[in-house]
Image (cartoon, rainbow, N blue to C red):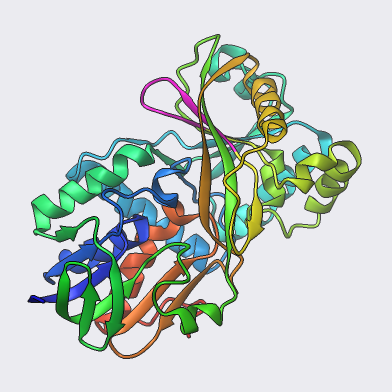
Amino acid sequence: MSQQDCDLLVVGAGILGLAHAYAAAKRGLKVKVFERSNTPLGASVRNFGQALVTGQAPGPMLDLARLSRGLWAGLAADAGVSIKQKGSLLFARTEAEEALLEAFCQGRAHEHQYNVELLRGAPLSNLYEGRFAHHRAALHGVDDQQIYSREAIPQLVSYLQRRYAVEFHFSTLVQDIQPGKVKTTAGLFRTNRVVVCSGHDYQTLLVEQISALQPQVCGLQMLRARLRQPLQLQHALLTGLSCVHYGAFSDLPEAEAIRQQIRQQQPELEANGIHLLISPTPYGELIIGDSHVYGSDIAPFNSEAVDQIMIDLAEHTLGSPIEVVERWQGVYGARGPGPFSVLRCDESVTAVLMHTGLGMSVGLGLGESTIAAMLGESAWPNLQVA
């Protein structure tokens, strides 16, 4: 076995792993990243690429999303990552959804300085030449950004190699971690610190520490589609259904009326964890989803009925039929003790896990915060540090 030295060894080349590699490398540390597949294939390339500030609950998640927003903007300039910065539009379809958006703008948005505006009347009717005028209102999340993940993640890998000489070992399984050394299928590596960002793989590394969190896996049905009536969409789109999913809204009293409406009128939405998200790609197509199913493992079989529910929701929101060109199963780690966990397993080994599908929104900030804490620059991220 070979022995090679580095300051930081990162397990996983998804957004969390790359975030930690970036934060460490720009501080001058020698970094190596290990990824078991020949290219990142997990949650970080299967998602919508919505880097949302507006949807985050006040507190650590909102703070991390704001930090991540600036880091994404820097990477757009330095690494050439394509980012849409027009924000998001969350459409209210019903009176209950409109009431929640009003309450949010009058209360929480003002208190916590969310950068939002509520569009009604002419401002709503004039959006995209009236395409969305059949909605009651739209919350414009000004700070929200849009990344095309399946291109952005490989771009970040290339940037870290080129700019900071980060060394990547793809198709390499990390088999065992001990203080100061890591055993892999490419040999034995010595390192000062290890950060494990292995996504929803809870069975390979640090099994005892991770199992204490009782995390689950979430599977999602996802679509890529074309509009039959072309639309040069520049915003990420959501509907009031998302208000019962995202922490910025879900605990407001007005959210209960939306839940009751869903249970009475479309219980299949709650049963399948469906809320509508739509993200434009750089090629004029749309990523559409999603549904949620949870467990220790996720079956690989998608439901056509669930896909059809999402297609119907999308066509109503967009005011146009769509043509599906691709389907896939999203997957991410879910339902731990909080939105994320930072496990300090010993002085040199740390595991970082997301328990929600918000890695693109907060991942860069979480990597920055964890590395800063590891180097003694600041306190550890203020949530689920064990």
Q: Position of residue 200 (x, y in %)?
A: 48, 62
Q: Is residue 114 left or right of residue 22?
A: right
Residue at horizontal 54 percent and vertical 49 percent from the top: 54
| Any part of residue 385 in sight | no
- How many labels sit on residues? 0
Residue 290, by quadrant, is top right
Residue at horizontal 17 percent and vertical 80 percent from the top: 191
**Between residues 132 and 147, which one lies in front from this camera angle?**
147
Q: Position of residue 225 (x, y in %)?
A: 52, 22
Quadrant holding the N terminus? bottom left
Residue at horizontal 61 percent and vertical 54 percent from the top: 110
Is-magenta flag for residue 59? no
99 w.r.t. 200: above or below: above
27 w.r.t. 74: above or below: below
Residue extent of the magenta highlight: 279-289
| Any part of residue 187 in sight | yes
41 w.r.t. 35: above or below: above
Q: Position of residue 160 (x, y in %)?
A: 17, 54
378 w.r.t. 274: above or below: below
Residue 125, by quadrant, is top right
Is-magenta flag for residue 282? yes
Q: Position of residue 374 (x, y in %)?
A: 29, 81
**Between residues 337 and 198, which one lies in front from this camera angle?**
198
